[in-house]
Structure formats: structure tokens, C-alpha cells
């Protein structure tokens, strides 16, 4: 039976090097990026529209909370068939009534960079991390859904480095996530997850460097927990079903048993 971490094929040195670079990327000051208009949840819609397909999502029997999941059952293209993973930059969808002017891209990127790092850390000992599409490579896409405007960041709570300061906090108190894993070459959806479980009650991102910012601790914990739930989903799909486990048990014959019966 597959168990957590039993399907790892990444070397410790490789994972350490990759995560070290990502920690730096999450924690260090970032070069200014051109502003882009934020996406937002369509009013009254159940889903944000980020995933390629929502038709096969069902309540998960293996995850606590409100997660909806899908994993392809095709024997040729299941999660078990893939050997590596690339993690895309995380996207954001604002709450339907959020004031975009108070959530510039600099603020949104503070949340998405950290969540990308958390996701990469969570899956890196299950699948080696790669940067390019290829055979047997998954592409992980993720989005934070329902990002809203938080309170003005008080002077006492602002980081010492002015480049890391943001005027209004990013409220993730009602955020959910949408993620999917695609075949990196064909774009076929192999698995998907919509997690509506509220983990960030009271959590706000109050600096571009949330990995070291005290006021952003609750937000870090929420992002880490969402990433952990994504990993839990992956692990659960690598476990044998009860029916498959029974078949495996019935067919198991200890070494030498055949000779003893002859």
C-alpha cells in the first residue's frame, strides 16, 4: 500500500537546494512588476472559473471540511503515473465587491509568492520539482479565491524595510483555493481540488515579506495548512482503495509458499 512519502524519488540535496531558493524568493524584496488588472469572483457564482473543468468535482470522503476533489481514474494517466511536477505562479481572484484600488499587485503578490513556496515545499518530497514541461511531468496550477481588503497597516506594524511595506493589509479570512494538476504536455486535467474550508479567520497579509513578518503569522499558518491539505489529497490518491487492497492481499503469496504446497 502506498503511504505518505513512500513514493518520493527526489534526493534530499535536490529538495533542500530547490526550497532554499524558493524561501529566498518568498522572503526577499522583489523587483517592481508591471501592474495588471485583478480577476474577481463573478457575483453569485459557485466557482471562480480558474479550473479548466469543474464537472467531475465531488465532495471528498478523505478530507475533512468542504473540499471537492477529482482524480482521473484512467490507468494510463493517474497521479501515480507521473514522476515530477512543476508549480506555476499562484493566481488570485478578488472578492466580488473588493476595492481593487486598495489591493495593488504588489500586495496580491505578497500572498501568492508565499503560497507558491508553501505548495512547492508540501509536494517536493512526493515529486521532484522541475521548471519545464515534459513526459510524465505534472503542472500544478493554483489560485486564491476571495481575497479582500484588510485594514490599514498601522505604522507600528510596518516592516523596517520600506520596500516591504504595504498600505492596506490583504484579508484572507474568507479565502478558499482552487487547484488542478494537468499533464504538462497535453494540458489534460489529471486531478483537481476546490477547498472552501475557511482556515484564515482573522488572517491578514501586512507585508510583502510575510515569511518573517510577525503580523502576518496567521496568514502564513493558513497558507501552510492549505498546502498541507493539497499534499493530503495527493497522498490519499496514491493509497490503494479498499477493494484493490483486498485483491492484493488475496493474491499475495509469501516467498517459498508455492514450493511448500507441492
Image: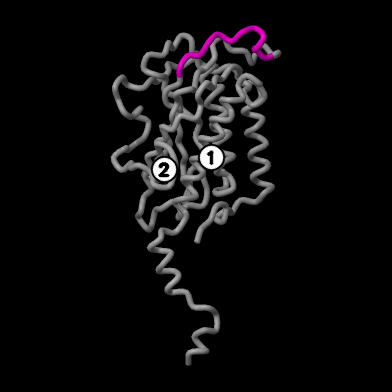
- Spatial separation of the CA atoms under disc 2 and disc 1: 19 Å
Residue 230 appears left or right of 206: left
Measuring from the top left, give residue 154's x and y in whole percent.
61, 8
Report the residue that reaches farthest toward the right: 160
Q: Residue at x 35, y 27 (%)?
A: 48
Residue 158 appears left or right of 7: right
- Residue denoted by label 1: 228
Q: Quadrant of residue 241?
A: bottom left
- Residue denoted by label 2: 182
Name which of mark 2 and mark 1 comes first in the sequence.
2
Residue 207 appears left or right of 200: right
Whether residue 170 appears in this view of the structure is yes
Measuring from the top left, give residue 81's x and y in whole percent.
45, 55
- Residue 154 falls inside the magenta stretch: yes
Residue 137 appears left or right of 157: left
The residues colored magenta run: 148-159
- Which numbered disc, 2 or 1, marks the residue closer to the eye? 1
Q: Residue at x 32, y 38 (%)?
A: 53
Measuring from the top left, give residue 72's x and y in whole percent.
36, 50
Amino acid at each position: 500500500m502506498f503511504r505518505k512519502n513512500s513514493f518520493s524519488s527526489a534526493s534530499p540535496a535536490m529538495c533542500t537546494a530547490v526550497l532554499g531558493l524558493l524561501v529566498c524568493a518568498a522572503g526577499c524584496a522583489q523587483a517592481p512588476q508591471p501592474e495588471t488588472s485583478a480577476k474577481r469572483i463573478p457575483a453569485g457564482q459557485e466557482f471562480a472559473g480558474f479550473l479548466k473543468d469543474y464537472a467531475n468535482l465531488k465532495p471528498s470522503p478523505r478530507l475533512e471540511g468542504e473540499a471537492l476533489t477529482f482524480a482521473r481514474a484512467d490507468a494510463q494517466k493517474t497521479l501515480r503515473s507521473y514522476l515530477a511536477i512543476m508549480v506555476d505562479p499562484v493566481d488570485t481572484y478578488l472578492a466580488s465587491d473588493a476595492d481593487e484600488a486598495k489591493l495593488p499587485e504588489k500586495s496580491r503578490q505578497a500572498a501568492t509568492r508565499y503560497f507558491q513556496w508553501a505548495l512547492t515545499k508540501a509536494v517536493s518530497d512526493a515529486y521532484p520539482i522541475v521548471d519545464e514541461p515534459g513526459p510524465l511531468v505534472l503542472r500544478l496550477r493554483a489560485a486564491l479565491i476571495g481575497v479582500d481588503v484588510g485594514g490599514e497597516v498601522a505604522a507600528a506594524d510596518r516592516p523596517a524595510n520600506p520596500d516591504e511595506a504595504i498600505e492596506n493589509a490583504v484579508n484572507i479570512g474568507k479565502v478558499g483555493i482552487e487547484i488542478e494538476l494537468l499533464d504538462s504536455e497535453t494540458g489534460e486535467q489529471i486531478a483537481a481540488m476546490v477547498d472552501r474550508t475557511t482556515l484564515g479567520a482573522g488572517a491578514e497579509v501586512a507585508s510583502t515579506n510575510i515569511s518573517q513578518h510577525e503580523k502576518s503569522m496567521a496568514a502564513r499558518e493558513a497558507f501552510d495548512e492549505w498546502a498541507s491539505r493539497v499534499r493530503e489529497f495527493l497522498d490519499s490518491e496514491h493509497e490503494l482503495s479498499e477493494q484493490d487492497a483486498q485483491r492484493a492481499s488475496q493474491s499475495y503469496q509469501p516467498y517459498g509458499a508455492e514450493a511448500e504446497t507441492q
